[in-house]
C-alpha cells in the first residue's frame, strides 16, 4: 500500500486556516496543500461545477500519492464530498479516503449551544445546500439552525480590505440579518474557512452572550481522532514534517495572501489542472 502525505484542499486561501490548526496538532505528518485560486471562489458556482472542479483536485492529490484528502472548503464539502465518496472513490482508489469539514463540525456543535439554536454564517453555495442544517439535526434532532449567506466577505478578505472600516458595514449587515432570525441563537459558526480573519469584527457585532466558533481547531481534533480510530490509514501516512503548497494561479499572489491565513511565510509552486 502506497504511503504519502495528507492532502488539504481549498478553492483558495481559506483552507490554510484549517491547515494551520491541523499542523499545530499533528506536526509529525507530511502535508500537501492545493488552492484552486484560478477558479475561486466556489461559493457562487453550481453544484455540478463545484463537483467537477473538486473531483479534478482530488484526482491530482491521489496522483501525488496522498492516501487521505481533507476538503478544507465548506462549499466543496457541501456540494461535492458525498458524490465523490459514494460514486468516485471506488473507481479512483477504494483504499483512499476523502473527508470534509461539515460533518465533524456538526458532530460537536450541540456541545457548545445551551439553547440548541445555532447560527451559521457561510457562502451562498453552502447555505443553499442546507448541509449544515441536515448534518446538525442528524446529531441533534432538537436543534434549530439559522443560516445567513455573506457574499461580500470572501471578496473583502481576498482583496485585503477586511481590516478596513468599510468592511464593518458588511459585517454588521450579515450578522444583524442572522440574529434577526431568532433571539435564542447562542452559538454562531463561521461556516467558511476565510471568515476567521473577520472574527474580531464579527464578535463586535454579536450580542455578548453569543459565542463564535471557528472550524480549524474542531477539524484538527476530529482528524486526530479519525487517525486514532483508523490505524490502517494512519500507517499509510508519511511522517517527515514536510509541507508543500500549490496553487492553480499566480505563485506570487498566493504566497503574499497565504501569510495572512497561515500565519507564516509560504513558498508555493504552480500547478496546471486539465479542466
Image: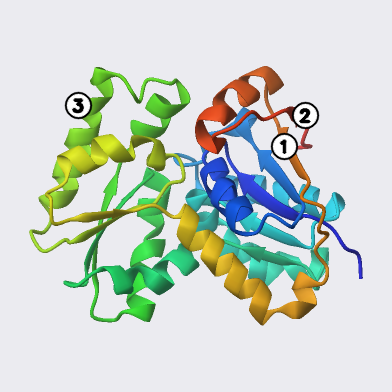
- For the residues labelled 1 and 3, the Cα–Cα distance comes to 34 Å
CA neighbours of label 3 inside 10 A, class few (<14), some (14 to 19), many (20+): few
Mark 1, residue position? 245
Note whether residue 135 is visible: no
Residue 156 x/y as whole percent: 38, 25
Between 123 and 160, the residue placed more toward the observer is: 160
Residue occupying image coordinates x 37% and y 20%: 161
Residue 83 x/y as whole percent: 61, 64
Residue occupying image coordinates x 77% and y 36%: 273
Residue occupying image coordinates x 69% and y 69%: 87
- For the residues labelled 2 and 1, the Cα–Cα distance comes to 6 Å
In the rendered view, tell whether residue 218 sits above or below residue 127.
below
Earlier sequence position, callout 2 versus callout 1: 1
Secondary-structure class at tag 2: strand
Mark 2, residue position? 269
Between 155 and 258, the residue placed more toward the observer is: 258
Residue 31 x/y as whole percent: 73, 50
> In the image, is 151 to the left or to the right of 2?
left
Residue 254 x/y as whole percent: 63, 25
Visual colour scheme:
rainbow
Place residue 189 in its image quadrant.
Answer: bottom left
Earlier sequence position, callout 3 versus callout 2: 3
Mark 3, residue position? 169
Residue occupying image coordinates x 49% and y 41%: 45
Q: In this rendering, which labeled residue sits more in front, label 1 or label 3?
A: 1
Q: Are marks 2 and 1 in contact (CB under 8 Å)?
A: yes
In the rendered view, tell whether residue 150 sits above or below residue 76.
above
Amino acid at each position: 500500500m502506497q504511503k504519502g502525505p495528507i492532502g488539504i484542499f481549498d478553492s483558495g486561501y481559506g483552507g490554510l486556516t484549517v491547515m494551520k490548526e491541523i499542523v499545530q496538532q499533528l506536526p509529525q505528518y507530511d502535508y500537501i496543500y492545493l488552492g484552486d485560486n484560478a477558479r475561486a471562489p466556489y461559493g457562487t458556482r453550481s453544484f455540478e461545477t463545484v463537483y467537477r472542479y473538486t473531483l479534478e483536485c482530488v484526482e491530482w492529490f491521489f496522483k501525488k500519492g496522498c492516501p487521505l484528502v481533507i476538503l478544507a472548503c465548506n462549499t466543496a464539502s457541501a456540494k461535492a464530498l458525498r458524490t465523490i465518496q459514494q460514486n468516485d472513490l471506488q473507481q479512483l482508489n477504494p483504499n483512499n479516503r476523502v473527508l470534509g469539514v461539515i460533518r465533524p463540525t456538526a458532530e460537536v456543535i450541540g456541545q457548545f449551544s445551551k439553547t440548541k439554536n445555532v447560527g451559521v454564517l457561510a457562502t451562498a453555495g453552502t447555505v443553499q445546500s442546507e448541509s449544515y442544517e441536515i448534518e446538525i439535526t442528524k446529531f441533534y434532532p432538537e436543534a434549530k439552525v439559522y443560516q445567513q449567506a455573506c457574499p461580500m466577505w470572501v471578496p473583502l478578505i481576498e482583496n485585503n480590505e477586511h481590516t478596513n472600516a468599510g468592511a464593518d458595514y458588511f459585517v454588521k449587515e450579515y450578522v444583524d440579518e442572522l440574529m434577526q432570525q431568532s433571539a435564542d441563537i447562542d452559538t454562531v459558526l463561521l461556516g467558511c474557512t476565510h471568515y476567521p480573519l473577520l472574527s474580531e469584527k464579527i464578535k463586535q457585532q454579536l450580542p455578548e452572550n453569543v459565542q463564535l466558533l471557528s472550524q480549524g481547531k474542531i477539524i484538527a481534533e476530529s482528524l486526530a481522532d479519525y487517525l486514532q480510530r483508523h490505524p490502517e490509514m494512519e500507517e499509510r501516512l508519511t511522517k517527515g514534517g514536510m509541507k508543500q503548497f500549490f496553487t492553480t494561479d499566480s505563485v506570487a499572489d498566493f504566497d503574499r495572501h497565504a501569510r495572512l491565513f497561515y500565519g507564516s511565510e509560504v513558498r508555493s509552486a504552480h500547478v496546471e489542472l486539465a479542466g
